Image (spheres, rainbow, N blue to C red):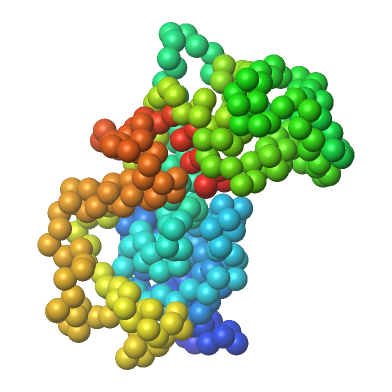
Amino acid sequence: MSAKRILACMLVLTVSAGTVLLTDVAGAAKRRGTPKDLLGRKIPKVKVVKMPLMRVLKHLSDVSGLPVKADWPGLNVAGITKQTPVTLRADNQPLAKVLDLMVNMISPKRNPLAWYLASGEVNVTTQMRAVLRNRYYIPTLARTAAPRKITPTRGIREINFSQTPLHLAVEFLRDLSGKNFHVNWRALESTGITKDTPVTVQARGISIARALDLVFDQLNVGRDRYASVYWIVQGGVVQIATGEVFNRRVSVKIYDVGDLLMIVPNFKGPRIDMQRSKSNGSGNNGGNSLFRDDDDDDDDDDDDDGLSTRELKERLKKNLEETIKMSIGDDMWDPNGKGRIKFMRDKLIISQTPLGFKMLEQAFRR
């Protein structure tokens, strides 16, 4: 075999941080099949040490033949950037498992990451943004029109509220948006907020939705969730009231989470030792590697061996449910609150008050 052919078959990349990635590049160029086929196809060798996440995703795309992209706005909110270092080692494993290992390693504790397949591409984002992108509404009345969004793509050229009475600020944003606004002044006044309460906001190039957030965030300083002021869109009308008002009735929303619950069957791969990760840091190598061979971890009971596909999927469901509940507090969920979560096949069904749904949106900032 010629030297040129050998170089084409094996890419060896070394950067200043000591990152090394070994993969079969020539084979990737010839790979054909459906996106799901490519997810299940094995990558001969992946070895990465402190490589920026952006470069890891690019190389996974190159070697698998399947585009792997990142939802950077969502990841940035979770504290993940293009330069987040990734340490990863896997031999002869499917792309799906490599992605699982990667997101598990870099996931923040309170905002776990996930990946999903859509339109022939792998997308890496936060778990909740992946859930919220597949939302279905169940209207309370038959033939109810779908709610219109209050987030115009064009921004406000300039907003300059300086000790402006609240009712004038709301009227300004209402006229600018062209939407119907309804303010429950009685509810606001019960918490000490009146039509004449002054607000001060200066901003440029923001959406009307963001302007509303800035106005009410200012009013909500020092208030609990029930005394705070929120805005939601119901039936094409922007409703403004307190959390106590928005916590009275319950509605249902359904999310398609099938891609988050996808399991690659009949797979046995490297295991993760989180204790080693915490004690030795993310840049480990050699004998202190985060990833261990099966022969070295016979005493590790926290692994997927022996679990059926159904049991693995149930574990994923439980983790997803815990993440959602934790994001807004246990007091918003049964038995302390009015919210409930259940799964029906690959559908996530959430029963919650408008306040609960608003808090979920704020927590994960779609």
Q: Classify residue 203 by image quadrant.
A: top right
Q: Is residue 35 above or below residue 13?
A: above
> Closest to the observer: 245 or 67?
245
Position of 34 with respect to 292 (left or right) is right
User: Is residue 151 shown to the viewer in this render?
Assistant: no
User: Is residue 301 shown to the viewer in this render?
Assistant: yes
Q: Classify residue 98 by image quadrant.
A: bottom left
Quadrant, the N terminus:
bottom left
Q: Position of residue 277 (x, y in %)?
A: 37, 79
> Closest to the observer: 180 or 25?
180
Q: Position of residue 122 (x, y in %)?
A: 46, 52
Position of 31 with respect to 75 (left or right) is left
Which residue is pictured at 54% across the width and 13% down the height? 145
Count of picture labels: 0
For this orientation, the residue located farthest to the bottom is 287
Which residue is pictured at 83% across the width and 44% down the height? 202
Q: Is residue 226 above or below residue 296?
A: above
Quadrant, the C terminus:
top right
Q: Position of residue 6 (x, y in %)?
A: 46, 83
